[in-house]
């Protein structure tokens, strides 16, 4: 009996606590949304399983915070910001900037949507977070998971788990969050606006763009050089026409491997209870609830800001743009552009907005990375 009791004390059953059970359910919900609802399954399934893995009772000594453990080694790329630039490399190798090059004024919509970042920054300060934490939380408004992780590791590593989970959660919920806001801010007449087919972009323009864009954006925000440098480098590999093998490796093997490691690492970092100096620094805290509330608000503000700015632009343009594409200024590529395209076809089956929406969508990726670089430059020094 003594041996049996000793064995029982080593199992997870002897360490069951309600916070862990809550997180196990939370991880299960992520997996359900990824599989049953098809909400960003490549992100939510690894993250959801990581949440479960990081919150199984009795596994604290083997988790991401246990020095020398396997998960701790895998978490290295998250902790030190290694994975986000590799994700950006893959995104660059998959992205076609033709729509943005053909209609460069749409970059303004990507910039307008970043208003959510600075609104969230102010809201974080009002809710009691210090300026470094507010900077890290604010980037959720850009709807860019890798950028959120990258900035969090620099400014507020203790909030990395809640910030990353919030960012990826709202990225996955784009099809749920954005349509009601778009519908509220636009009239049926505006939703029916058709836009001209973008002009054809030459190969030379596609090759020059990533080089010039890297120079301009990194001069503005040197702190974002790791992200933007890899984004435009990946795009150059794709567009050069002479590095197809490298482009395919970056857009397939590398990005898939890193996505798995990032998802598991971020998910496993959401340990429900993590006592440090008598204070719970784990996931289930009031601070995490505030971060999730701010994340939802920031995503709504970013979507609304993009749509409203598109309507303002129409006051000065002879050829009107469909204001719905302003919602694509958030960095959720390509889901946000697909949502706008789907709404356009709902009101007019022959209205194809995908290519037009991709312009502010990829501009939003650039804009959120620039905003992160600005915040890092100001707050990190």
Image (cartoon, helix red, strand yellow):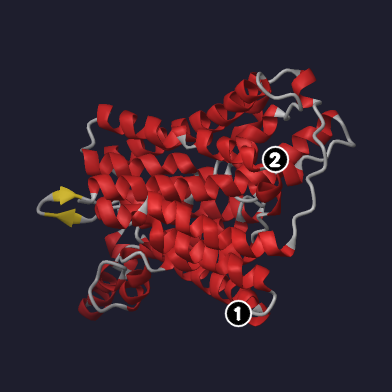
Question: How many neighbours does mark 2 have within 10 angstroms: few (below 14), some (14-19), or many (20 or more)?
Answer: many
Relative to 350, 145 lies left or right: left
Which residue has dot 2 on it? Answer: 339
Looking at the picture, does residue 240 appear above or below residue 266?
Answer: below
The image quadrant that residue 327 belongs to is top right
**From the image, which quarter does the N terminus lie in?**
bottom left
Relative to 345, 300 lies left or right: left
Q: Is mark 2 on a helix, strand or loop?
A: helix
Which residue has dot 1 on it? Answer: 246
Which residue appears at 90% of the width and 37% of the height?
350
Q: Between residue 134 and residue 193, name the one nearer to us.
A: 193
- Percent across and percent down for residue 80 are 31, 66
Looking at the picture, does residue 120 appear above or below residue 338?
Answer: above
Looking at the picture, does residue 281 appear above or below residue 242?
Answer: above
Which residue appears at 15% of the width and 48% of the height?
279
Which residue appears at 66% of the width and 18% of the height?
315
CA gap, disc 2 and disc 1:
31 Å
- Percent across and percent down for residue 241 are 70, 75
Q: Which mark is residue 371?
A: none
Q: Residue furthest right?
A: 350
- Percent across and percent down for residue 349 are 89, 35
Q: Nearer the viewer, mark 2 or mark 1?
A: 1
Q: Is mark 1 on a helix, strand or loop?
A: helix
Whether residue 52 is visible to the viewer of this picture, yes or no, is no
Q: Between residue 224 and residue 242, name the one nearer to us.
A: 242
Marks 2 and 1: CB-CB under 8 Å? Answer: no
- Percent across and percent down for residue 284 are 31, 45
Whether residue 80 is visible to the viewer of this picture, yes or no, is yes
């Amino acid at each position: 009996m003594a041996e049996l009791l000793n064995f029982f004390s080593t199992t997870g059953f002897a360490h069951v606590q309600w916070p862990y059970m809550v997180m196990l359910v939370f991880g299960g919900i992520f997996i359900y949304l990824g599989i049953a609802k098809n909400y960003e399954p490549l992100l939510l399934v690894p993250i959801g399983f990581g949440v479960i893995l990081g919150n199984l009772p009795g596994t604290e000594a083997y988790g991401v915070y246990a020095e020398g453990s396997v998960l701790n080694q895998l978490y290295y790329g998250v902790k030190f910001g290694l994975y986000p630039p590799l994700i950006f490399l893959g995104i660059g190798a998959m992205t076609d900037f033709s729509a943005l090059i053909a209609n460069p004024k749409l970059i303004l919509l990507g910039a307008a949507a970043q208003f959510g970042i600075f609104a969230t920054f102010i809201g974080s300060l009002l809710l009691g977070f210090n300026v470094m934490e507010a900077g890290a939380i604010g980037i959720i408004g850009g709807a860019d998971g890798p950028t959120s992780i990258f900035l969090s590791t620099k400014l507020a590593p203790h909030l990395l788990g809640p910030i990353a989970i919030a960012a990826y959660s709202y990225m996955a919920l784009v099809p749920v969050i954005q349509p009601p806001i778009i519908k509220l801010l636009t009239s049926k007449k505006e939703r029916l606006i058709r836009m001209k087919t973008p002009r054809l972009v030459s190969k030379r323009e596609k090759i020059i763009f990533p080089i010039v864009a890297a120079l301009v954006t990194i001069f503005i925000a040197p702190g974002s050089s790791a992200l933007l440098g890899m984004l435009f480098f990946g795009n150059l590999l794709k567009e050069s026409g002479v590095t197809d093998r490298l482009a395919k490796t970056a857009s397939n093997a590398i990005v898939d491997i890193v996505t798995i490691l990032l998802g598991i690492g971020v998910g496993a970092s959401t340990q429900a209870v993590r006592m440090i100096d008598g204070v719970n620094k784990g996931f289930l805290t009031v601070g995490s609830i505030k971060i999730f509330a701010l994340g939802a608000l920031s995503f709504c503000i970013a979507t609304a800001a993009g749509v409203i700015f598109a309507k303002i632009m129409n006051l000065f343009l002879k050829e009107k743009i469909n204001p719905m594409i302003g919602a694509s200024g958030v960095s959720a590529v390509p889901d946000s552009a697909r949502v706008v395209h789907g709404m356009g076809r709902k009101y007019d089956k022959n209205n194809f907005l995908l290519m037009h929406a991709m312009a502010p969508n990829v501009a939003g990726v650039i804009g959120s990375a620039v905003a992160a670089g600005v915040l890092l430059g100001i707050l990190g020094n």
